[in-house]
Image: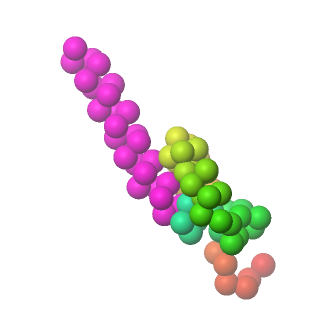
Amino acid sequence: MIVAEVILLIALAYVLCGLAVGVPFVLSGVDRVDEAARGASLGFRLLILPGTIALWPLMATKWIKAPRSGGHP
């Protein structure tokens, strides 16, 4: 029983981290990572939210490495 609880707590922590990264990423970070997503609708952003939560380590890395917008190429 303890092993199952530990696994569930780890899964919960992963999902909570995914939410903490995913929601801000979907709201503003996706614009920096993918030019085609700039000005995307709320529907599109809601569609990519579950994948962003599941793949949050990859999305956070892409977001950090993405160039900042500011007119500099």
Residue shown at 74%/83% (left/top)? Answer: 72
Q: Nearer the viewer, residue 11 or 27?
A: 27
Q: Is residue 48 left or right of residue 1?
A: right
In the rendering, at what x and y percent does residue 20 appear? 41, 55
In which quadrant is the C terminus drawn? bottom right
Residue shown at 33%/25% (left/top)? Answer: 7
In the rendering, at what x and y percent does residue 1 appear? 22, 14
Residue shown at 60%/63% (left/top)? Answer: 42
Q: Is residue 40 above or below residue 54?
A: below
Q: Residue furthest top?
A: 1
Q: Is residue 64 visible?
A: no
Residue shown at 29%/32% (left/top)? Answer: 9
Q: Residue furthest bottom?
A: 71
Provide the residue span drawn in magenta.
1-25
Q: Residue furthest front?
A: 43
Q: Is residue 67 left or right of residue 6?
A: right
Magenta run includes residue 17: yes
Q: Residue furthest left?
A: 2
Q: Is residue 70 visible?
A: yes
Magenta run includes residue 66: no
Q: Is residue 58 left or right of residue 67?
A: left
Q: Is residue 12 left or right of residue 23?
A: left
Location of residue 13 by image quarter: top left
In the rendering, at what x and y percent does residue 32 appear? 65, 68
Dominant secondary structure (helix, strand or loop) of the stretch shown in magenta = helix
In the rendering, at what x and y percent does residue 62 appear? 63, 56
- Count of numbered circles on the image: 0
Q: Is residue 11 above or below residue 51?
A: above
**Which colour scheme appears in the figure?**
rainbow
Location of residue 11 by image quarter: top left
